[in-house]
Amino acid sequence: MYNIEQDFETISNNFRKIKKLCPVIEQAAQACVNAIKNGNKVMFCGNGGSAADSQHLAAELVGRYKINRPALNSIALTTDTSILTAVGNDFGYDTIFERQVEGIGQKGDILVGLSTSGNSKNVLLAMDKAKSMGITTIAFTGEKGGKMKDKADIAINVPSDTTNHIQEMHIAVGHVICGIIEKECSPKIKALFLDRDGTINVDYDYTFETEKFAFVDGILDLCKQAQDKGYKIIVITNQSGVERGYYTIEQMNAFNNYMKDEFKKHGIEITDVYCCPYLEHEDRKPLPGMFLKAKDRYNIDMANSVAVGDKERDSEAALAAGVKRTYLLSKSAAESKGVVISSLKEIVL
């Protein structure tokens, strides 16, 4: 019988050992960051599973890994069947990546070569061509490294000599590098964080009925001002009424969608809505979970963002997440960790 537990134990041990490679992974990521910031690109190549990983990682950069942001300049040299078959037929399979590097590579680019053995000839030739053109080379290999270990400018030799386990670590390392690239190369945005009930809409105590929706006085003007000044508007709301049984997730979502549509009628775009439907959870304010999720997803500059709520827990959560300017909308609060205001019209962004 196949020993599943042993397989997972091996995988776990490999990932514990890979932490020793953090400095070289950081070095590789920073090389990619510098290239992209200078207007260059990151190219990936490899065979078989490494071809799939090449395509996967290029897609993370051109598309999105975690953050909604502009596309980043990256390409997998493993995907154009016309080029691969033409070059393979006319010049030989060993040249399929070398020829592409020669054609589209530029000084200052990055070439990431993936090979579990470290000895794939077509990857080695591509790295030779890259180095002759002033392109930095990064090798993803196994523990022994093969010939690529000495040929590459930066070699990431993951701690295994078994093909499948090497590939598991290659994609994990690639994801870490994509995360660093994305964070460093994405523009930081500022956000206006808003509580919902009592800040955006009139609070009828566990509000969920769309027919009762009504804007709090001053919220439209505040949001228009924020939008004009480049703030993304993000709603952060506790909705424990779901767990209490007062309304369902579907009713909560319907109310949120109705709210967004009402804003849209006034030319205001709500970037996202974060809800915590639980009584005890790391996302429930005064804990900062929802703020931190928004920060990671949108690369938000928390220090230059603003939060507004009507309960002290709103201010506590925002401050815990690093938001410096927090406002508490209250006509009765004597003091707060945020700035107490009696009207949204008092906020100047």
Image (spheres, rainbow, N blue to C red):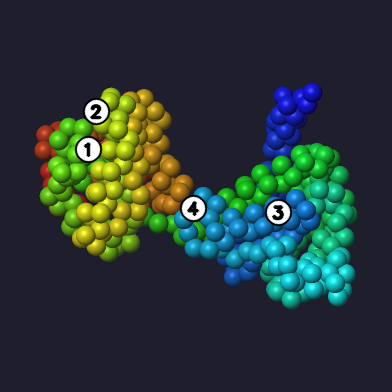
Q: Residue at x 39, y 48 (%)?
A: 302
Q: Residues within 10 Å of mark 3 (few under 14, many from 20)?
A: some
- Tell me which corner region of the image, top left, top right, bottom left or bottom right, holds residue 286: top left
Is residue 1 visible in the rendered image? The answer is: yes
Residue 15 on image: x %, y %: 70, 35
Q: Earlier in the sequence, mark 4 or mark 3?
A: 3
Q: Tell me the quadrant of the picture where the N terminus can be found.
A: top right
Provide residue 236's location: percent of width, then percent of height: 32, 42
Q: Which residue is mark 2?
A: 246
Distance CA(mark 3)–CA(mark 2): 48 Å
**Residue depth check, mark 2 versus mark 4: number of the one nearer the observer:** 2
| Mark 3 or mark 2, earlier in chain | 3
**Residue drawn at x 15%, y 35% as measured from the top left:** 204
Above-or-below relation of 207 to 131:
above
Identify the residue position indicated by label 4 in the image.
67
Distance CA(mark 3)–CA(mark 1): 46 Å
Q: Count neighbours of disc 1 (C-alpha within 10 A) and say few if under 14, some if 14 to 19, many if 20 or more.
A: many
